[in-house]
Amino acid sequence: MAFLWLIIIGAAAGFLATRIMRIEADVPTTIAVGVLGALIGGLVLRFMIMALGWAAGFVGAVLGALALIWVWQTYFK
């Protein structure tokens, strides 16, 4: 069943992509473009989320440290 969904979503994504890029392609090529594009896009998106997750964690740590220093300087000095 998952394979069928992959083909359906791939066909829809491939159709939209070929229309946006103004490329005339047959149905198997459209499906292949959609499925391969989904695989590539999924990998890139997961990598970006992972990298942004690390960056967000670092930013959060810096902001937390700044807040702690502010509280310490404001209330304990």
Image (spheres, rainbow, N blue to C red):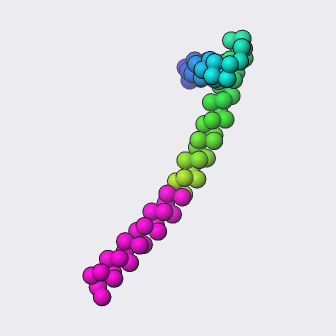
Q: Foreground residue, 54 or 71?
A: 71
Answer with left or right where residue 64 lies relative to residue 3: left
Query: What residue lies at 27% left-to-right and 82% top-to-bottom?
Result: 75
Residue 6, image quadrant: top right
Where is residue 46? Give x, y as percent.
Answer: 58, 43
Q: Quadrant of residue 76?
A: bottom left
Position in image of residue 73 (x %, y %): 33, 82
One can see residue 45 in this view: yes
Residue at x-position 43% and y-position 67%? 63
For the image, the number of numbered tags is 0
In the rendered image, is residue 3 in sight? no
Residue at x 57% of width, y 22% of height: 9
| Image quadrant containing the C terminus | bottom left
Identity of the residue furthest to the top in this view: 26
Instruction: Indicate left or right for 36 with 50 as reference.
Output: right
In the image, farthest residue toward the left: 75
- Does the magenta portion include 8? no
Magenta span main SS = helix
Q: Position of residue 25 (x, y in %)?
A: 72, 14
Quadrant of the frame with the N terminus: top right
Q: Position of residue 72 (x, y in %)?
A: 33, 81
**Is residue 76 in the magenta section?**
yes
Range of the magenta residues?
A: 55-77
